[in-house]
Image: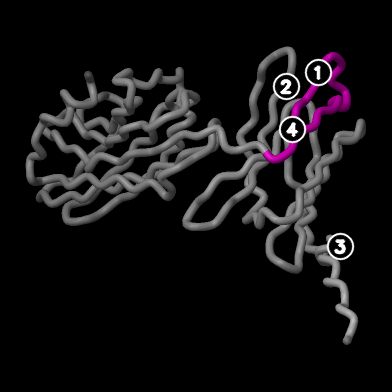
Amino acid sequence: MVLFLFAAAMATGQVDLRLDIATSTVLTHEPLTARVTVVNNGALPLAVNAADGSGPQLYFGVEHDSGVSAVRREGGALPAFMVPPGRVETVEVDLTMRFVLTQSGSYFVRALLDGGGVEARSSLKVIDVVPGIELIRTSGNVPYAPGVRRTYSLRYWGRQRRDHVFLCVSDAPSGRTFAPIHLGTLMRVVRPTMSAGDDGVVTVKHQVNRSQMMVSTLKSRRSRLSLVSQRPVRTSSAPMPKPPTLPRK
């Protein structure tokens, strides 16, 4: 268990390592940004991720709650940076670009510095990867991509006491999956609608509060999906009928 072997190493006292992750829950394939802060309490500059490997290297330990370490992706070397004495430097890393985090469940994440006489570890963070709850699904062709059938799944999940809605997209038969697109908060009263035209234009309409719907327009291309615009419109759902008037005696 690599993560917990690293956890046994004690910091030297010269370096403090901090890890912050903006949200504790992400949808499958959603970017997961880790913010790592290195504090140099020593008297000498600290060269992190030096190309010649002479100084400390920044690593991440990522483990699923099943006890299996997350598979590392190829490439994507972390940037090299210098931390002067008494100074602080921060780097941001998208963990989904470095690890395969497609299995639902909890992941234990820790940042680690090792090498050049430095051993430091951050506190442990727990991240939940969820598929989301599907509201509606549709599919359509992709312009200039013969044989590709693209599926659009509108899903929601709670975050900071609000429901948030995401568009999740995948291709058949290749199985390619795009990063979910966040479309904002959701009120689950009026059922959302979604359409996908042969021209690649996708339109999603969902409720954001008691009086407004949000209309999101997206453009679907062979290699990417982009959010073009969002505009609020008034809710057009029919009001509840009035109760019948009782006859007077």
Q: Residue furthest bottom?
A: 249
CA separation in Å, label 1 and label 4: 13 Å
Callout 1 touching callout 4 (CB < 8 Å):
no
Residue drawn at (56%, 45%), measured in percent from left and top? Answer: 157
Q: Position of residue 171 (x, y in %)?
A: 72, 21
Front disc: 2 or 3: 3
In this orientation, which residue lies closer to the viewer: 139 or 43? 139
Marks 2 and 1 sit apart, C-alpha to C-alpha, by 6 Å
Closer to viewer: mark 1 or mark 3: 3
Quadrant in which the C terminus is drawn: bottom right
- Sequence-earlier tag: 3 or 4: 4
Residue type for callout 3: Ala
| Residue 148 numbered mark, or none | 1
- Mark 2 residue element: strand
Please state which of residues 86 and 177 is positioned toward the viewer in this rendering: 177
Where does label 3 land, which residue?
238
Picture coordinates of residue 172, whole percent (x, y): 74, 17
Please state the extent of the stretch shown in magenta in the rendering.
135-152
> Which residue is at 75% across, 68% downward?
211
